[in-house]
Amino acid sequence: MSDNFGDFIKEKRARCNYSLKYVAEIIGISNVYQSSIEAGKRPAPSYDVLMKLRDALKLNDDEFGEMLDLAAESKNSRAVAYDLADYINQNDFIHKTLRFSLKNKIPESEWIRFFNAMNEKYQ
C-alpha cells in the first residue's frame, strides 16, 4: 500500500509500463501537471480525472478505493473520499446514523464493534 497519492499513481503507472506522458495524454491533463501530482507537489485531480485514471491504469475495485482514499488525503488529511461522500449523501439512513453518532458522542469502540459484526457477517 502506498503512503501517498502521487506514489500510488506512479506505482500503478509503472506496473502498466506506461510513460508519464502517455498517461497524461489519455486522461487529458498536461504531463507537467501529471508530474507534479506524482511528485506530491499538487493534490489529486478532480473526480472526473480520477475516473479516467482508474480506467487508464486498469485499477480493480480495491485499488480504486485506495486511490480515492489517498486522493482525499492529498487534498486535506481530514477529507472524506468522493465515493464515501456520495454513499453517505445518497443514503439517508447512513447520514442520519452519522449525525446521531456525532450528536450523542458514540465512542469509537462502538463503531469498531459494529464494524467487526458487519465484517463477520458479510466477509
Image (cartoon, helix red, strand yellow):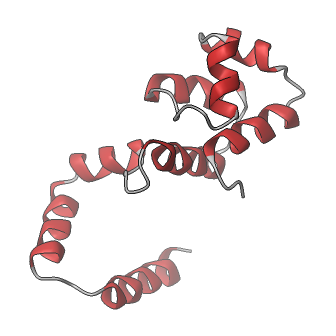
In the rendered view, would you say 19 is above or below 28? Answer: below
The image shows residue 67, relative to residue 91, as above or below, that is above
Q: Residue drawn at (17%, 69%), measured in percent from left and top?
A: 97
Residue at the image point whose x is 36% and y is 84% from the top: 114
- Which residue of the protein is positioned furthest toward the right in this rendering? 17
Left or right: 79 with respect to 56?
left
**Residue at point 27%, 53% (across, down):** 88
Q: Nearer the viewer, residue 87 or 105?
A: 105
Name the image quarter holding the C terminus. bottom right
In the image, residue 24 lies at what x, y percent? 69, 15
Quadrant in the rendering for residue 118: bottom left
Which residue is at 41% across, 85% downward? 112
Q: Nearer the viewer, residue 34 or 102?
A: 34
Q: Give the number of marks.
A: 0
Q: Position of residue 84 (x, y in %)?
A: 37, 51
| Rendering quarter of residue 100 | bottom left
Name the side, left or right, on which 110 lies relative to 75: left
Residue at the front extreme of this rendering: 41
Q: Quadrant of the N terminus?
A: bottom right
The percent position of residue 82, horizontal first and vertical second, equals: 39, 42
Residue 28, percent across and down? Answer: 59, 10
